[in-house]
Image (tube, rainbow, N blue to C red):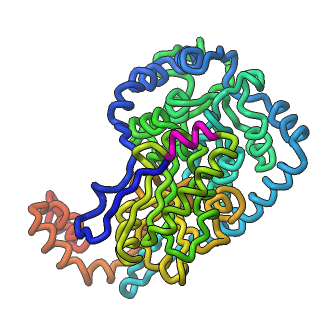
Amino acid sequence: MLNRIDLRGSHRDPRGLLPRAQLDVSVAVERIRPTVEAVHQHGFSAIREATERFDGMRLERLRVPAEAIAAAAETLDPEVRAALLESIKRARRVHADQRRTDVTTTVVDGGTVTERWVPVRRVGLYVPGGLAVYPSTVVMNVVPAQEAGVESLVVASPPQSQNGGLPDSRVLAACALLGVTEVYGVGGAQAIAMLGYGSRGAATPVEAAGDFEHCEPVDVITGPGNIWVTAAKRLLQGTVGIDAEAGPTEIAILADETADPRHVAADLISQAEHDPLAASVLVTDSPALADAVEAELAVQVAATKHGERVRTALGGEQSGIVLVGDLEQGLTVVDAYAAEHLEIQTRDAREWAMRVRNAGAIFVGAWSPVSLGDYAAGSNHVLPTAGCARHSSGLSVQSFLRGIHVIEYDEAALRDVAGHVVALANAEDLPAHGDAVRARFRSEAEQPGGRPGR
């Protein structure tokens, strides 16, 4: 079921040899560019047209009525409610510890630099709703934004025909449990465009907009989605901030002969059921484990609900078993792969985990499966994919904060460093920079255009 790649004895850089989905976001950008530009120009009418074309539903309004959000919470299955509340509680505990405090550094007597951490004013949180619906993603987006102190939160999620054109009721219920009241039933690239530009439209006359419940533009957009959502986020980057270009989910497992093949197979399947493009990769120095996992996959895939989807994902070019000579080479391989989710199922698992450089999140040992992190570990499941963990982090409180330096020098402190400022300004042929300092220490008569004797 899984392709095998034998890297034993290889000293090549493994990056070009590893399984990876071939998704060209730049092509998708050009496909969705007209939709994004139409929303920018025409607002709601373009959003409605795109939703009818892509989702087969005609929107009569954008914003979900408050009573529908409240009703979703009231009718939520008690077991699901309890699970969401526990997930919220654990996520708050972890994310509260990520808050930053302002720090003032005394550089010299009379000269300080304070780094302030200021939350963005308004954020748009995208919650997907394609092959599956994700109330847990509401938790993962909203909690860090709230803990950062963001004052205005808006959630966008695709309309569902089985819920009367509103987002999934479980998504709405999660919003209610978190106190989010501004929710829009819009998905895909048109949702990202709406969040970035607002729904009024640059070419829409103000009088034509009326008092319709429009979405106002946000400052930052976060949340996972399909390739069209990713492409729209790339197109909007710069107009707004984004968390990352999240693609199809992926799991890598570094395992030795001590790993239980049943656990490994189950965890590979758990990510493969997300999407036919999901990636499931086992990296091991044990051919015997690889064989045992293959045998387990044959049994477990046959019994799983989304078997066809899982088979497609596991059989795709993005998934496979990578054989390595030892765990040192395995560590090199998983660092090169930079997985969204990385499990370590080896002897001394924590020791190996602490040596990993590149991963969105690391799950240590047999009792820390990725599924735990998806829902109730307290960690965040909005993570970088497609190798972006080499340079990007998962969603956190920091995603919603900006560091602002506040510089405060008195006269003596500026006088003490003035010569260095002037020297560097002259070295860069920017003499006016130096003059801006000199001007503070000249007498009025010495100022350019000044009159001696005044």
Q: What stretch is highlighted in magenta?
A: 307-314
Residue 395 falls left or right of residue 152: left
Q: Which residue lies furthest to the bottom in this view?
A: 109
Q: Quadrant of residue 181?
A: top right
For residue 151, above or below residue 155 = below
Q: Does the magenta stretch include residue 278?
A: no
**Looking at the image, is 100 positioned above or below residue 84?**
below
Q: Which of 200 and 81 is in front in this view?
A: 81
* Residue located 46% across and 36% down the image: 227
Q: Where is residue 450 in the image (x, y as percent from the top left)?
A: 17, 61
Residue displayed at 20% across by 72% down: 442
- SS majority, magenta: helix
Q: x, y (%) of residue 145?
A: 62, 54
Residue 237 screen position, x and y as percent: 40, 42
Q: State the image coordinates of residue 319 (x, y, percent, origin top left).
A: 45, 50
The image shows residue 403, relative to residue 77, as above or below, that is below
Q: Which of 216 and 388 is in front in this view?
A: 388
Name the residue rendered at 9%, 69% in the picture: 427
Quarter holding the C terminus? bottom left
Q: Can residue 312 be seen in this view?
A: yes
